Image: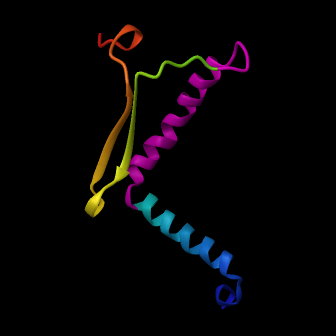
Amino acid sequence: DLLSQARPPLQKVIRETDRTAGIVVADHEYFDNVLNTLPDAYQALARQGIYGDFFSFYLCDLVIKTNGKGGQPVYIKVAGQETGRCAPR
């Protein structure tokens, strides 16, 4: 068996690739949606940087999602602004 003779780092890469493929297959509808919307997102980013080597973005909210106890998601609001450009319309 080639895998049993391979070096441990290669074995780990193959295990992690198999694990990742399982996650993608389990949530294939979300993954398909991401792949379908990425070209539009990249075009929007490209338009933002067309005038130089910088981007102009406004950060209205920054929320970090992490795993809590029992695998339940925990949302941590890091930054937020509700006035100016970020005011609800």
Image spot of residue 74 (x, y percent): 30, 48
Residue in the picture at 41% in, 54% down: 28
Image-based side of 24 in relation to 55, left or right: left
Residue in the picture at 69% in, 16% down: 50
Q: Closer to the camera, 62 or 22?
A: 62
Image spot of residue 68 (x, y percent): 30, 56
Q: In which quarter of the image is the C terminus?
A: top left
Q: Closer to the camera, 81 or 13?
A: 81
Q: In which quarter of the image is the N terminus?
A: bottom right
| Image quarter of residue 71 | bottom left
24 in magenta = no
Across the whole image, how many numbered discs are drawn on residues?
Answer: 0
Most common secondary structure along the magenta stretch: helix
Residue in the picture at 45% in, 58% down: 24
Image-based side of 12 in relation to 81, left or right: right
| Image quarter of residue 11 | bottom right
| Image quarter of residue 77 | top left
Image spot of residue 84 (x, y percent): 39, 8
Q: Closer to the camera, 15 or 35?
A: 15
- Work out whether 45 lies above or below 10: above
Residue in the picture at 71% in, 84% down: 6
- Work out whether 58 lies above or below 13: above
Image spot of residue 79 (x, y percent): 40, 28
Image-based side of 69 in relation to 28, left or right: left
- Work out whether 40 lies above or below 68: above
Q: What stretch is highlighted in magenta?
A: 26-54
45 in magenta = yes
